[in-house]
Amino acid sequence: MRWQKKLGANVNWSEASWPDLASLAPLKTKRVDIYAVTPFNDIPRRRELGVSFVDFAYEARYFFALSTNANQFKSPQGLCGKRVAVPRSSKGHGMHLTIERWSHDNCTKAGNPAVVLVYSESIATILLEMKQGRVDASVNSGGSLDYQNQTEGNAYIKIGNPLYKPMGGLAFLNENMQLGLALKNALDGLIADGTYVQLLRKWKISVDDTAIGEASINAGPDPAEH
C-alpha cells in the first residue's frame, strides 16, 4: 500500500475472519497493530472498547437492487412495502434504525406501506437471496457495489442518493496513539500529492462518495445521528 511507503515502514500482513475482526480480538490481544480492512467503520461503540481510528474515507451507503429490477425502483419510494435485507451484524451499527427512519419519513408518512426489514447472515447471503427473488433490495457501500458491478457485469443498481455516509479508516489501540498520528500524516501526504484520488479512480471507486479532504482521528459520527 502507498501509505506504508509514506510511513517508511514494512508491513507484515495477517488475515482473519470477519467475526474475529469485528470482535477486535486481533488488536486487543496485540496479534496485529493496525486493522487495514477497507475501511473499518469508525463508530462510537468500537471506540468505547479502547480502539481509535485514522479516518481516511467515507463509505456512502446506498439502497441497491438487481439491475433487472430497475423499473421497480425508478425512485427510492419504490422501496415502500418491499423486502429490504440487512446483515444481522448491522444491528450494532444502527443500520436497521436508519432504514426504519427512512421508511417512516418516505413511506408511512405518505400513506404507503413501510419497508419490510429482513435480517440475513451476510452480504454474500443477501446477494444470493436477491437473485433467488427472496428479497427485493438491500444496503451496501457505493465502493462495494462498484466492485461487484466490475466483477458481475453491472448486475446491481444504486437507488437514489446515499442513505448516509459513515467514516472509516485504519483501526489501532488507543495506547498506540503515536502510531495513529504517523498513519494520519502518511495518509495526509497521499491526499496532498494527488495519489489518493488517483487510486480511487484507478479502482473505479466514486470520488464523490469516498474522498475526504484530510485524514482525521476518531471523527466518525454516531450512526444514531443519520
Image (cartoon, rainbow, N blue to C red):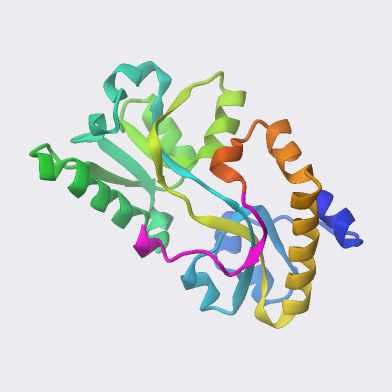
Q: Residue furthest left?
A: 111
Check residue 43 for magenta coloring: no
Tell whether 139 sits left or right of 21. left
- Residue 70 lies, with reference to residue 109, above or below; the image says above
Does residue 45 appear in the picture of this structure?
Answer: yes
Q: Where residue 104 appears, x then y in whole percent?
A: 18, 49
Tell whether 118 sits left or right of 59. left
Tell whether 143 sits left or right of 138. right
Magenta-colored span: 212-226
Q: Where residue 187 appears, x then y in whole percent?
A: 75, 57
Q: Nearer the viewer, residue 136 or 206?
A: 206
Q: Nearer the viewer, residue 108 or 117?
A: 108
Q: Where residue 179 appears, x then y in whole percent?
A: 78, 73
Task: Please report the residue visible at 34 percent of the width from the left and 19 percent of the height from the top.
Answer: 69
Q: How many marks?
A: 0
Displayed quadrant of residue 64: top left
Q: Nearer the viewer, residue 211 or 108?
A: 211
Task: Please report the residue visible at 72 percent of the width from the left and 55 percent of the height from the top.
Answer: 15
Tell whether 21 sits left or right of 192. left
Displayed quadrant of residue 225: bottom left
Displayed quadrant of residue 215: bottom right
- Residue 62 lies, with reference to residue 66, above or below; the image says below
Task: Please report the residue visible at 73 percent of the width from the left and 32 percent of the height from the top.
Answer: 202
Does residue 1 appear in the picture of this structure?
Answer: no
Q: Nearer the viewer, residue 27 or 169?
A: 169
Task: Please report the residue visible at 55 percent of the width from the left and 25 percent of the height from the top.
Answer: 149
Q: Main secondary structure of the magenta part?
A: loop
For the C terminus, give its image quadrant.
Answer: bottom left
